[in-house]
Image: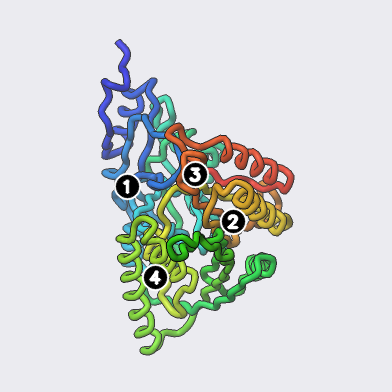
Amino acid sequence: MSMTLADLPDEYLPRDTADVVRTVRDSRPQPLTVRGGEYGDHAEDELAPPDRRVVLSLRRMNRVQAVDADARLVRVQAGARLSDIDRTLAAHGLGLPIVGDHREITAGGFAAVGGLSAASHRYGMFSDNVVALEYVDPDGRFGTCGRAHHADRFRRILGGAGRTGIITALTLEAVEVDKDHTWLTSEAHRFLDFDTFVEHSVAEIERPGDAMLQVGRWVDTAPLRVSRPVGTGHVQLGTVRFGQWSSLHPTTATASLRARRELGSRARKSLGAIASAARGPAGMPVRNAAAGALMFSPKVLTLRDAEYLADTVITSAERGPAYRVAVFAPLSTYTAVFHRLHDLFTDYRERSGCFTVISAMTYGVRSPYLHELSGEDHGFLTFTCRVRPTETYTGKSGTSELLREIDTAIADICHSERATRYETD
């Protein structure tokens, strides 16, 4: 007798690869949704249809199994958080070259989507730093692959978002670094003009110098409606557009720098806590202030602080439904892709009012894998468009026809400019 969805548990919690094999076999033909950590893989505010699948959570498969300090390698279970792996490596004078921007990201989940960070201009994607892995295929069969064996399968699983196999364990490359005592100084350039911001971004991506981290952010707000006294209606204020490019370079620690770092760290945490509690329309100014704090990053901080800076503020500042798109653009078409995507979103906002704040983040990606595909390095572009919360644009059934039109337009841009959409699920 075949099992139905009602017969299955809400969540499987395997502890090792053998448990995953049994889970996949027992759940067939029902589809599984894989979750890497405690909070899952999808943000609460994503525009996505309800997930009715059975969940396989890897949060109990979270061990750092072995560190080979001489070879600069670490073997971990797929549910191990990158922050925990990094702390374990720190005891050996090592660290992960690529980590995500918040502390709950897991090794298996990050590898399954490629994985990027502000250090990708130096070290490529997280998946470029995976040496070998264990996996379970959709039929419940166990396998291994790596750079030196079953390389084609290895590449299909890395970045495959779980469609070609569930990653259960990985061997990762590490680098010699002391993230708690590597001090960085931020060289920031600020812009009010989008064209100039894009030009500067290209120059920084092509010539990063000794920058250990680099990131550019652009924010473009919709016109604001401000209430006048009773009986006099409303007035519209103009849009606000500004951007910042930050390159973080090594520097020497001093007592003054340490004091400034501590003061800045406390201020960001306080602002993040306040923004987290600020809900609804009344909390919008506070959330915008939190986003601004991220744009104007501190002048001095440690490498570990810098890697997780976004986790301090941005997760609290960005609330509400959003349409997101991320793209790898070859450097030869990066400028065109950036402009065309920005124009697409602003045009839809002006014509339909579907979006409010449009923000973009960008940095360089020197990935051996991507270079093989196109013969050049890439820029990474991600847009977050806050959706006006009305039934016209988002309904219980999921993404609206309007957003599907935008999806089609993005596909056309990517095809004509040889860009690749970054899929995370």
Q: Amino acid at mark 2?
A: Phe
Q: Amino acid at mark 3?
A: Thr
Mark earlier in primary sequence (1, 4)? 1
Q: Residue at x 45, y 38 (%)?
A: 48
Q: Amino acid at mark 1?
A: Tyr
Q: Residues within 10 Å of mark 1 (few under 14, many from 20)?
A: few
Residue carrying label 4: 305
Can you say whether 256 is above or below 104 in the image?
below
- Disc 4 and disc 3: Cα gap in Å? 25 Å
Can you say whether 132 is above or below 262 in the image?
above
Dot 4: what SS? helix
- Disc 4 and disc 2: Cα gap in Å? 22 Å
Along the viewing direction, whichever of 383 and 353 lies nearer the viewer: 353
Mark earlier in primary sequence (4, 3)? 4
Q: Is residue 162 visible?
A: no
Mark earlier in primary sequence (4, 2)? 4
User: Mark 1 and 2 residues: CB-CB less than 8 Å, in contact?
Assistant: no
- x then y, percent, for residue 170: 41, 47
**In the image, which disc is placed on residue 39?**
1
Mark earlier in primary sequence (1, 2)? 1
Dot 3: what SS? loop
**In the image, which disc is placed on residue 84?**
none
- x then y, percent, for residue 20: 33, 33
- Disc 1 and disc 2: Cα gap in Å? 26 Å
Residue carrying label 3: 424
Residue carrying label 2: 380
Residue 8 in the figure: left or right of residue 257: left
